[in-house]
């Protein structure tokens, strides 16, 4: 099979399209014939070595396709099942071996492309809005990078739960997409001071929750956008890691809470994985959650996908097709 291999950490040019032996499923594992691969920001952190992975490796951790073989003792999935998954390294490939208990069957009417676009970013948006700090009517939240993969989905789910949504984006074209995803207000944070805008839009009150995936360039101002007892959910670092900070600031700024969650801990059991994925894929099937695939490239063009994501030149999801 063909795969995108990483032999040394580096820039997009470190991604190499190679022929490798087909993998075989062991006990408890299934072999998935991949039809669509999800590209995520975490793939960049792994490529650069910011998040450690053992080398050499096949990059990527999200895909959807069909079960092509199963190992011993597999009960939950069968040959020919249409499945999706996230969280297992090795998805930038034609085939992948995945623990059967991490696979989710795609519901009737949801295709492989939608499955690959929904698993990682969809379940992330779901746990952020529904579990980490469950949003409800009366809440206002600030969503940074609102036209991004997680961003567009988070805006929609936050609104579904009755919250008011303020988004930040870098360009007018991205602002239009965030509005389509039901953001009530959108701030062009490359030109406008988002802290001042949030204060203006909330009549000085601030917001109950900030969802910050940008990190270094937004973190301090994000804290200053919160109403007393508000929550800063720092869930990414697209602009770089946040500098160390003094927890006393949380008290001074109004008994704030700070959390740094990771999807892994919100789908740790099979029951939680199935419940969360089931709700997300159900919304997709019903048309309540709209997945925007901003770009679809052949697998061999993985480096180009990374370049676009790092250059802030993408919206919604990027898929690679083997
Ligand atoms: P996005 O599609 O959101 O892409 C990143 C976006 O961040 C860009 O489009 C850009 O939007 C914005 N951005 C701001 N500054 C920079 C910068 N210096 N370089 C690049 N982008 C920048 O990516 P994802 O949806 O895949 O992921 C978003 C973040 O969420 C990532 O940090 C990712 O690691 C994290 N994440 C965390 C999870 C968790 O469970 N903790 C799970 C999933 C994702 P704009 O142009 O509008 O500024």
Image: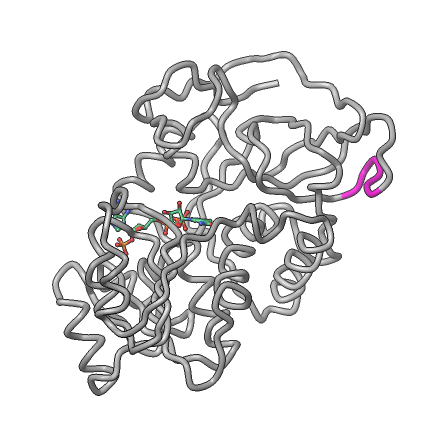
Q: Is residue 139 above or below residue 93?
A: below
Which sits in the foreground, 4 or 46? 46
Q: Where in the figure is residue 212, as x and y percent of width and height?
A: 33, 58
Is residue 289 shown left or right of residue 82? left
Image point (61%, 26%), residue name? 94
Q: Where in the figure is residue 25, as x and y percent of width and height?
A: 75, 23
| Quarter of the image with the N terminus in it | top right
- Kindly report the secondary structure that dominates the magenta region of the rendered protein: loop
Q: Quadrant of residue 246?
A: bottom left
Image point (47%, 62%), residue name? 153
Q: Where in the figure is residue 240, as x and y percent of width and height?
A: 26, 42
Is 181 magenta? The answer is no
**Magenta residues?**
76-81
Q: Is residue 237 above or below residue 13?
A: below
Is 80 magenta? The answer is yes
Image point (54%, 36%), residue name? 61
């Amino acid at each position: 099979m063909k795969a995108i291999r990483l032999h040394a950490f580096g820039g997009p040019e470190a991604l190499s399209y190679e022929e490798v032996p087909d993998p075989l499923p062991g006990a408890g594992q299934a072999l998935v014939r991949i039809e669509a691969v999800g590209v995520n920001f975490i793939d960049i952190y792994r490529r650069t070595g910011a998040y450690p992975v053992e080398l050499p490796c096949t990059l990527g951790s999200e895909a959807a396709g069909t079960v092509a073989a199963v190992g011993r003792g597999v009960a939950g999935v069968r040959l020919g099942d249409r499945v999706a998954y996230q969280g297992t390294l090795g998805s930038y490939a034609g085939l992948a071996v995945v623990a059967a208990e991490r696979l989710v069957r795609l519901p009737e009417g949801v295709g492989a492309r939608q499955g690959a676009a929904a698993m990682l970013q969809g379940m992330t948006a779901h746990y952020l809005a529904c579990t980490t700090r469950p949003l409800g009517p009366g809440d206002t939240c600030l969503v940074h990078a609102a036209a991004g993969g997680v961003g567009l989905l988070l805006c929609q789910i936050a609104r579904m739960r009755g919250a008011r949504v303020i988004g930040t984006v870098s360009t007018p074209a991205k602002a239009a997409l965030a509005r389509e995803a039901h953001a009530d207000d959108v701030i062009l944070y490359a030109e406008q001071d988002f802290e001042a805008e949030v204060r203006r839009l909330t009549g000085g009150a601030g917001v109950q929750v900030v969802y910050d995936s940008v990190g270094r360039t937004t973190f301090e101002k994000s804290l200053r956008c919160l109403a007393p007892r508000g929550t800063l959910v720092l869930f990414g670092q697209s602009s770089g890691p946040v500098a160390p900070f003094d927890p006393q600031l949380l008290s001074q700024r109004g008994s704030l809470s700070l959390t740094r969650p990771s999807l892994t801990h919100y789908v740790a059991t099979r029951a939680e994985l199935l419940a969360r994925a089931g709700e997300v894929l159900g919304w997709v099937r019903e048309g309540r959650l709209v997945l925007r695939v901003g770009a679809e490239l052949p697998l061999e063009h993985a480096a180009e996908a990374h370049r676009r994501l790092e250059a802030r030149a993408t919206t919604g999801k990027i898929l690679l097709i083997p």
